[in-house]
């Protein structure tokens, strides 16, 4: 029986392994099956297909040009290759367009153009161009305007080797009422400031000449004829300015000092100079995000409304200070949704236009028409009504999908965005009122440089678009006459904030810094540095990663405690006063590396102070300073304690305490009289005692003589 059981165990084990393998295979297949079917380059395909250039928008009287590059990745020559471009029926709405271009769910074929490739040797590349007029494509009528999915393939013997999908827009060269399109490009980055120095890894890449931030500024600002709005974070500019002046870099080996001549410092200086020039251009608008960008909702929930208001103001002040360009007044782009309390704080700060995603709002939409207005009214708790510019959610998702766009050839990626805007336009191509579109990529937008440059040109070239700044769009577009929208801020939104415990620590750190401000000398840069650390700690970048933010906050408290403990009173010998008046010397020491302003106060009931019992003094770092207090003894003579207190200027915080022992050698008249009187009394008493003893002795002598006589 035992061998049988052994065989059964082996068989069951093999069956379990096979079952697990099948399950794993099934799990591996499920995600792919759940996704929309997408045609892509086959892993085994011997060729690559790249769309070098093509006509993204043609008029019924124009022509279409397609230039492609075919690469043979194999080592053998390929014969019988053909490039085929197929136009499909136009998309009826945005969802139809997205399904066709992204998921390959195209409609019927309208027309096909193709070209044969000559023999393509191994490891070689060949470029081919196809040209057709709109009439030849069957698109020469004004009635045929719209967005047409285009599928380009490389085929061999009716076998598709590789595929690229895009779209072509057919539109009249003159559009009566083009869409006002406002592109808001965020200039933001994760904070570089840390408790131990500067984290340079992220900014080193972003600030490089070919880095993300430089690419956005040069690519979008490099077309002075294309209006664009930059949403700038003043905290990023602070970080760049710090780097440009030289900085302390945090490394695994410890802090390392870097001068202004280092590569990163020069890159930071170059970025600031380039940005300042760009923001001064005629068609460029600047808006400031709340410094950080700040988590305003969390601050309001944690009782830091003053901090929230300050971060709103600091965002504008820092941008203008670094660039010399004043941001558009009354415009705010919060980094996340706003709670009702945060909205009230924002409106009370003078904000009249907000940029907020549709998912953070409820109501205020005109549902009677397709592609509703990007503007809404929003009412705060105090009754203030502001305008809200709502980014197009489809385009926001598209910009956020870096992996998708970066996988496309730059012309195809640009056309994906431009054709999307055309799909919006053709939902209501003959609308009588001015329509608009707001495009807002994510905070850390990281597009390809060719994509950015191509997008700016395509926005300008598209007949159905009129690029404008945000302020122009808000001015030109009518707000729907609907009930004001409401803030959509649920439990999930609140749970996404910085934790309440985090904000409480931030509030304690702010209080500690406030008390420290009265102690530090005015020429010290410490309060400003710590202030920046706390402003930075309120950033939404620390959501879900509170460790670095708490390190900033706790570094302030730790340093404040160390500074408070660095003040000491130096004990000395007993102070002797040779008369009723004299000088009491008090020596204090500053063991910190920065100058401190403190108040030294003496407390005693035994002396009067000629120049006051308190003195404010600045003690240099690592130095001792002796102060002289002129006093007059109320009761000359004796030894008395004098309490010494070192505190801040307002007397709210005691930094050190000690006791000074004072002995006066002056003779008091009253005391002298008492001593003389006591001495005379004792002398008289002694004389009286002596006289009495002598009388007793005489009496005793007489008595003794009398007894002798009798005897």
Image (tube, rainbow, N blue to C red):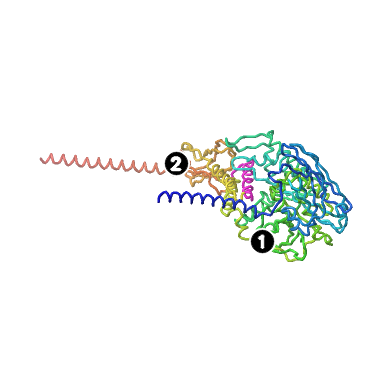
Within the image, what quadrant is residue 78 found in? top right
How far is disc 2 from disc 1 in space, using C-alphas?
Answer: 74 Å
Q: For the residue labelled by badge 2, is the local secondary structure a helix, a strand or a loop?
A: strand
Does residue 318 appear in this view?
Answer: no
Does residue 2 appear in this view?
Answer: yes
Within the image, what quadrant is residue 52 found in? top right
Q: Are marks 2 and 1 in contact (CB under 8 Å)?
A: no
Relative to residue 119, is residue 583 drawn left or right? left
In the image, residue 699 sits, relative to residue 494, either above or below, namely above
Q: Which residues are magenta?
A: 519-541
* Residue beneath disc 1: 488
* Place of residue 451 in the rendered image (x, y in percent of width and height, measured from the top left): 76, 45
Residue at 85% of width from left, 57% of height from top?
A: 144
> Looking at this view, is 412 or 441 the one in front?
412
> Looking at this view, is 635 or 273 the one in front?
273
Circle 1 crowding by C-alpha within 10 Å: few under 14, some 14–19, many from 20 = some
Residue 506, magenta (yes or no)? no
Q: For the residue labelled by badge 1, is the local secondary structure a helix, a strand or a loop?
A: loop
């Amino acid at each position: 029986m035992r061998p049988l059981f052994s065989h059964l165990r082996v068989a069951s084990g093999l069956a379990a392994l096979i079952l697990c393998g099948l399950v794993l295979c099934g799990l591996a297949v499920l995600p792919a099956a759940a996704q929309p079917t997408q045609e892509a380059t086959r892993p085994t395909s011997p060729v690559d297909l790249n769309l070098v250039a093509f006509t993204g928008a043609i008029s019924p009287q124009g022509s279409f040009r397609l230039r492609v590059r075919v690469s043979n990745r194999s080592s053998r020559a390929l014969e019988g290759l053909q490039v085929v471009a197929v136009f499909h029926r136009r998309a009826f709405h945005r969802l139809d367009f997205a399904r066709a271009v992204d998921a390959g769910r195209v409609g019927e074929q309208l027309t096909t153009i193709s070209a044969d490739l000559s023999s393509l040797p191994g490891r070689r590349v060949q470029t081919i161009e196809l040209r057709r007029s709109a009439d030849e494509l069957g698109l020469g009528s004004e009635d045929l305007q719209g967005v047409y999915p285009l599928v380009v393939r490389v085929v061999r013997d009716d076998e598709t080797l590789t595929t690229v999908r895009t779209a072509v827009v057919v539109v009249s060269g003159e559009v009566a009422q083009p869409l006002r399109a406002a592109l808001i490009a965020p200039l933001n980055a994760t904070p570089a400031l840390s408790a131990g120095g500067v984290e340079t890894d992220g900014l080193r890449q972003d600030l490089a000449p070919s880095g993300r931030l430089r690419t956005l500024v040069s690519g979008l600002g490099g077309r002075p004829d294309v209006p664009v709005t930059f949403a700038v974070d003043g905290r990023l500019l602070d970080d760049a300015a710090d780097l440009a002046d030289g900085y302390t870099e945090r490394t695994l080996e410890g802090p390392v000092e870097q001068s202004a001549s280092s590569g990163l410092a020069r890159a930071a200086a170059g970025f600031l100079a380039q940005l300042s020039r760009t923001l001064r251009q005629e068609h460029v608008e600047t808006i400031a995000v709340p410094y950080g960008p700040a988590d305003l909702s969390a601050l309001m929930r944690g009782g830091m409304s003053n901090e929230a208001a300050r971060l709103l103001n600091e965002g504008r002040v820092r941008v203008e200070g670094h660039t010399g360009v004043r941001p558009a007044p009354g415009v705010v782009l919060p980094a996340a949704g706003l709670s009702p309390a945060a909205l009230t704080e924002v409106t009370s700060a003078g904000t009249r236009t907000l940029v907020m995603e549709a998912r953070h709002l409820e109501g205020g939409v005109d549902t009677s028409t397709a592609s509703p207005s990007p503007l809404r009214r929003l009412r705060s708790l105090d009754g203030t009504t502001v305008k809200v510019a709502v980014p197009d959610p489809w385009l926001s998702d598209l910009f956020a999908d870096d992996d998708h766009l970066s996988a496309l050839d730059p012309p195809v990626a640009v056309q994906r965005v431009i054709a999307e805007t055309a799909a919006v336009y053709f939902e209501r191509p003959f609308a009588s009122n001015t329509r608009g579109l707001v495009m807002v990529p994510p905070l850390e937008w990281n597009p390809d440089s060719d994509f950015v440059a191509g997008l700016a040109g395509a926005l300008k070239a598209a007949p159905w678009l009129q690029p404008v700044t945000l302020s122009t769009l808000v001015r030109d577009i009518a707000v729907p006459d609907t009930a004001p929208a409401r803030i959509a801020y649920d439990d999930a939104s609140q749970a996404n904030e910085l934790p309440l415990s985090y904000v409480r620590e931030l509030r304690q750190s702010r209080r500690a810094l406030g008390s420290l401000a009265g102690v530090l000398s005015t020429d010290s840069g410490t309060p400003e540095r710590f202030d920046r650390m706390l402003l930075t700690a309120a950033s939404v970048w620390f959501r879900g990663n509170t460790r670095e933010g708490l390190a900033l906050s706790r570094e302030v408290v730790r340093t404040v405690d160390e500074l408070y403990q660095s003040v000491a009173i130096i004990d000395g010998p007993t102070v002797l006063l040779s008369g009723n008046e004299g000088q009491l010397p008090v020596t204090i020491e500053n063991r910190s590396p920065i100058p401190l302003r403190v108040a030294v106060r003496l407390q005693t009931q035994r002396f009067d102070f000629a120049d006051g019992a308190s003195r404010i003094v600045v003690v240099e770092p690592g130095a001792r300073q002796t102060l002289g207090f002129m006093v007059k003894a109320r009761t000359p003579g004796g030894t008395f304690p004098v309490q010494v207190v070192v505190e801040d200027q307002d007397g709210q915080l005691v930094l050190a305490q000690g006791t000074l022992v004072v002995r006066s050698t002056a003779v008091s008249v009253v005391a002298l009289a008492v001593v003389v009187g006591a001495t005379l009394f004792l002398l008289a008493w002694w004389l009286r005692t002596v006289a009495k003893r002598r009388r007793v002795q005489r009496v005793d002598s007489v008595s003794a003589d009398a007894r002798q006589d009798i005897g």
